[in-house]
């Protein structure tokens, strides 16, 4: 009898659900920071806006998170949470990239 070294689908789904909650909280926090920066820019018309810089920082933070966590999980053989990390964090990074041009 051969023993499998890959994680079970149930365990992968549980890890993916836990990471999904963490990712959504991080994305919400970054969106809140971007919104507050944009709101503050409306009151300070003498300086250039800071919102594009905040969006760029969030984009790079999410891109790095997608590459490290998603890529690392895929290398370890955890396909479900790795794919979810790449799609969710990569999609959020794309969203923030679109905010840099506004």
Image (tube, rainbow, N blue to C red):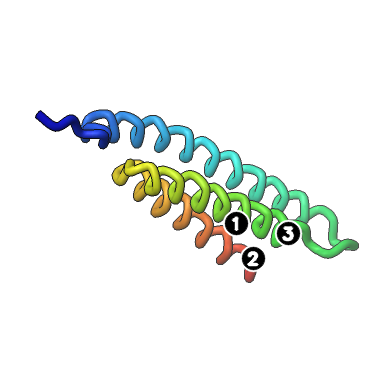
- Name the residue that disc number 1 marks: 59
Return the x and y of residue 1 as percentages of the image width and height: 9, 29
Rounded to the nearest angstrom, the CA distance separating label 2 from label 3 is 7 Å
Say the numbered circle drawn on residue 100.
Answer: 2
Examine the rendered structure and indicate whether residue 21 appears above or below residue 88: above
Q: Circle 2: is it few (<14), some (14-19), or many (20+) Cα within 10 Å?
A: some
Return the x and y of residue 60 as percentages of the image width and height: 62, 56
At 65% across and 57% down in the image, what residue appears? 55
Examine the rendered structure and indicate whether residue 21 appears above or below residue 90: above
Examine the rendered structure and indicate whether residue 61 appears above or below residue 17: below
- Name the residue that disc number 3 marks: 53
Q: Circle 1: is it few (<14), some (14-19), or many (20+) Cα within 10 Å?
A: many
Rounded to the nearest angstrom, the CA distance separating label 1 from label 2 is 9 Å
In this rendered view, identify the residue nearer to me: 76 or 92. 76
* Label 3: which secondary element: helix
Q: Would you say 22 lies left or right of 57 here?
A: left
Mark 2 and mark 1 in contact (Cβ < 8 Å)? yes
Q: Circle 3: is it few (<14), some (14-19), or many (20+) Cα within 10 Å?
A: some
Examine the rendered structure and indicate whether residue 45 appears above or below residue 6: below
Return the x and y of residue 57 as percentages of the image width and height: 68, 54
Residue situated furthest left in the rendering: 1
At 45% across and 45% down in the image, what residue appears? 72
* Label 2: which secondary element: loop
């Amino acid at each position: 009898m051969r023993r499998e070294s890959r994680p079970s689908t149930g365990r992968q789904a549980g890890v993916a659900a836990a990471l999904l909650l963490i990712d959504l909280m991080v994305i919400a926090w970054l969106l809140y920071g971007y919104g507050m920066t944009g709101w503050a820019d409306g009151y300070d018309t003498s300086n250039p806006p800071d919102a594009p810089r905040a969006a760029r920082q969030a984009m790079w933070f999410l891109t790095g998170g997608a590459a490290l966590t998603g890529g690392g999980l895929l290398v370890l053989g955890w396909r479900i949470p790795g794919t979810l990390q790449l799609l969710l964090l990569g999609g959020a990074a794309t969203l923030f990239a679109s905010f840099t041009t506004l």
